[in-house]
Amino acid sequence: MRPQFAGLREGVIRCIVLHILAVFAVAAIAGCQSRTAPKPSGADLRFPDQEARDFTLTETSEGKKNWTLWASYAAMYNDRNLVDARSIRIEFFDSKGMRYSTLVANQGLVDQRTNNLEAVGKVRLVTETGVRMETDSLRWINNAQKIVSDAFVRVTRKQDVVTGYGFESDANLDHFHLKREVRAEVRDEGESGEPISR
């Protein structure tokens, strides 16, 4: 009777030890899995199809130049028909081929299907007549030949300054309007006093 009891006790102890080892093994495997970061798949990585330095892109209509973009660097993504350009300058031209405004920005995103443009970062647009627009971002709607922006915009014409949100304009800033929080500082020509805020 005693040897059977001893064998049974050894079997129980062996079973407990194996169970404890199994728990430790599972915990160790789970610990190793949580420490290793998942590797990105090829689908998660996006590389440009083409890259270029000193890049130039011109949009024409019926043989006439509408605008020309210069960039220090550009990346082309064919699947999205997208050009991502950095340190950009764009010149806009009228129907006679005369430049009427110039835009500079940190970044420009061009949709090659529509030639719509989004300019981002320290955006400055200056017309040949001296009107200046400043904002953080704007969009050029190519088929409408229109500039729009939801960001804060400041427009300076001579000594007058208009600021606000919800900007919409033609490319030479002759006809523009703001929709929200509009403020104007109007100063008569030659006036040296404080501007009148409206």
Image (cartoon, rainbow, N blue to C red):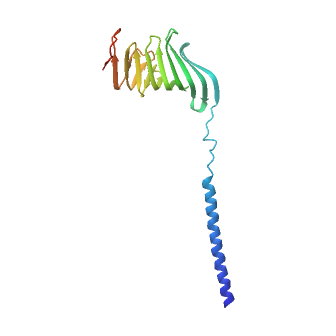
Q: Quadrant of the N terminus?
A: bottom right
Q: Residue furthest bottom?
A: 1
Could you tell me which residue is drawn at 43 percent across and 24 percent down?
A: 148
Which residue is at a point 65% across and 73% down the rendered structure image?
17
Residue furthest to the front: 193
Q: Is residue 192 left or right of residue 63?
A: left
What x and y, as percent, mark residue 126?
Answer: 47, 16
Q: Name the residue at 67% across, 80% down.
A: 10
Q: Position of residue 37 (x, y in %)?
A: 61, 49
Q: Is residue 133 above or below residue 188?
A: below
Residue 28 location (% of width, % of height): 63, 61
- The location of residue 124, given as percent across then percent down, is 48, 20
Q: Residue 177, can we see it?
A: no
Question: Is residue 158 placed above or below 24 in the rendered structure?
Answer: above
Residue 179, compared with residue 62, is above or below; it is below
- State which quarter of the image contains the C terminus: top left
Residue 91: in sight, yes or no?
A: yes
Q: Image quarter for residue 26?
A: bottom right
Give the tally of numbered discs: 0
In the foreground, 191 or 130: 191
Residue 23's image quarter?
bottom right
Position of 183 with respect to 37 (left or right) is: left
